[in-house]
Image (tube, coloured by chain):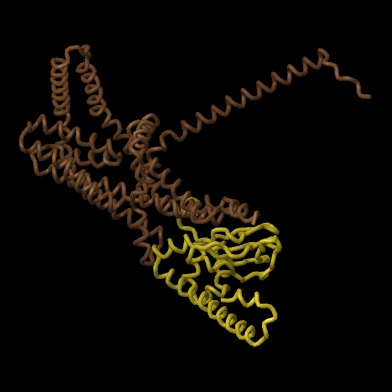
Chain colours: A yellow, B brown
Amino acid sequence: MNPFWSNIFHKKSEADSLIAFLRSLAIFADLGRREVSFIAGLVHARRYAPAETIFEGGDPGTGMYAVRSGRVAIFIRHPDGQKEQLAVLGPGDFFGEATLLAPARRTASARTLEETELVGLFRADLMEATRKHPNVSNAILISLARILSERMQAAELEIRQLRAALRLSPPPTGTESDDLP
Amino acid sequence: MTPKPVLTRVHLLLFFFVLAAGIAVGLSLFSSASTVLTLIRTATSGLFLPLLLSLIATFLLGPIVSFIERENISRTLSIFLVYLLVAALLLLAAGWLSPHWQEMWSSLRTDLPRYTAKFITLLRDAQENLQNRFPYIESYDLTGHARTLAEQLVAQILVGTPKSALRLGSLLILVPLFTFFFLRDGNLILRTCVSLTPNRYFEMVHDLTSVVSRQMADFIRGRLLEAFIVGLVVTLGLSFTDLRYTPILGIFAGVTNLIPYIGPLVGMIPGILIALVDLGMGAQFWWIVIVYFLIAQVIVDNFILIPVLISRYSNLHPLWVLLAIIMGGKLYGVLGMIIGVPVASIIKIALLEIRHYRNTFALPDTAQEQERPT
């Protein structure tokens, strides 16, 4: 085909592997092929060097990242300069989804451990999509809301269990129990 | 025990040669750079207008394309559909207007000198009046200057219009082509530019770009719609009178309405002049003045359109408006005068958005600096 016309009517073949990766994510598992290929046009695939900062706690957070390859460490910086590692994420995991819908600062820092490929989905793109393609973005938003409410329920259960455990065990130090709501 | 360096004649000669070579290299680099710059300038000189027009068309057609795309039609196909629609509308308009247009053009050729002559007599009367009242004003050949200016202007319009029709032909090919690619790949172009930013700042730049570009698109769309509606109102208002050339006057009022403060005043000069020459100071003349001032400007534009379409946000101080018009005029003539103010407004929107963003979230590096002392 003539390059001019193939530029207008070509189908992206390199996007297929991205679509396959997105379908493997838990967050988009319920979506159909059409919706996922639409998301593939929204996300940004980015490469990170080893030990590169993805974001720091306190940064403006505008979206979520999914790990395509490599490993990412999530940690908190304490005021005294110590780092507390919360999790190490591998391919198929995603993080930062809490700021996808509501603008907020990042509550933890993320840093790559090795050569990493991340796929980012950001609020600006999602909001643009809700205005232009309401049907597809409805499916995306519902599946996001499902994931978020599942996580919230799990967190709430955990808080309840921790509270119960705290009540059962005799409080050795009074200061720690004061921190809990 | 290092020997003390002695500046021999050879050293001086070497130093001189190095210096001369350095200057020569610098000069040649500078001249080649300026040649490259002139080459770039000549290469892009004809592109400014088509690019500008196709950007405007992209902003106007974008929402329609997205609306069609919503019905599960691919973007390329929906752009073609919009093009078909626009082409049909243009053909209809041309078919409806062309007989009137021909007539109007030929009568305008004969009328234009008449209007300018009347304008010059008006000016002379005013000057004589002024000199009778203040006789100490040195007699200045105002009418002579005005006459040469007006004659130049008329000649330019009469001769230049068929010439610019030739340029219009190339625009008719280039603008739809550019617009097509802007409509289809505009988002992709922006995404590619944004994706060049380093990882650390990517998220912030991405968010900021989307906010700023949305504000800009709203602003440009609002301005164009405002100009269109004002032009329509003027055309309708004037068509109640016996005034001729109402479509041309309406278009002129609409286009000049893009410039705040000064534009509307300039836009009403030809209409009022023609009314004065053809109709005299009758009831119709005052109706025309009312249409221009009260209906189009005060009621429609200030009370209805500006509050609805354009946020206070993008308002510029009159001083900035004047500066933007003067600088735009210096750069690109009349076209620059028209687009100078919108460009200044867009810059203001971008700056305000960045400041707003900085206030909402502290920037990453400043956030770190704030954290460090604690």
Residue B233 shown left or right of residue B16 in the figure: left
Farthest residue to the bottom: give it: A168
Could you tell me which residue is drawn at 52 percent across and 30 percent down? B37
Could you tell me which residue is drawn at 50 percent across and 69 percent down? A36
Could you tell me which residue is drawn at 41 percent across and 37 percent down? B48
Instruction: Measuring from the top left, give residue B92's x and y in whole percent.
Output: 21, 50
In terms of depth relative to the viewer, which is nearer, B371 or B16? Answer: B371
Q: Is residue B298 above or below residue B151?
A: below
Instruction: Measuring from the top left, give residue A100's x and y in whole percent.
Output: 51, 66
Q: Is residue B93 above or below residue B152?
A: below
Could you tell me which residue is drawn at 5 percent across and 38 percent down? B283
Q: For the C terminus of chain A, which image quadrant?
A: bottom right
Farthest residue to the left: give it: B282
In terms of depth relative to the viewer, which is nearer, B171 or B304? Answer: B304
Q: Is residue A124 above or below residue B166?
A: below
Residue B335 shows in the view: no
In terms of depth relative to the viewer, which is nearer, B163 or A30? Answer: A30
Instruction: Measuring from the top left, give residue A180's x and y in whole percent.
Output: 59, 76
Residue B293 shows in the view: yes
The image quadrant that residue A88 belongs to is: bottom right
Farthest residue to the front: give it: A174
The number of callouts visible is: 0
Residue A177 shown left or right of residue B121 in the figure: right
The image quadrant that residue A86 belongs to is: bottom right
Residue B299 shown left or right of residue A172 in the figure: left
In terms of depth relative to the viewer, which is nearer, B273 or B98? Answer: B273
Instruction: Measuring from the top left, give residue B228's x and y in whole percent.
Output: 25, 47
Residue A14 shown left or right of residue B80 in the figure: right
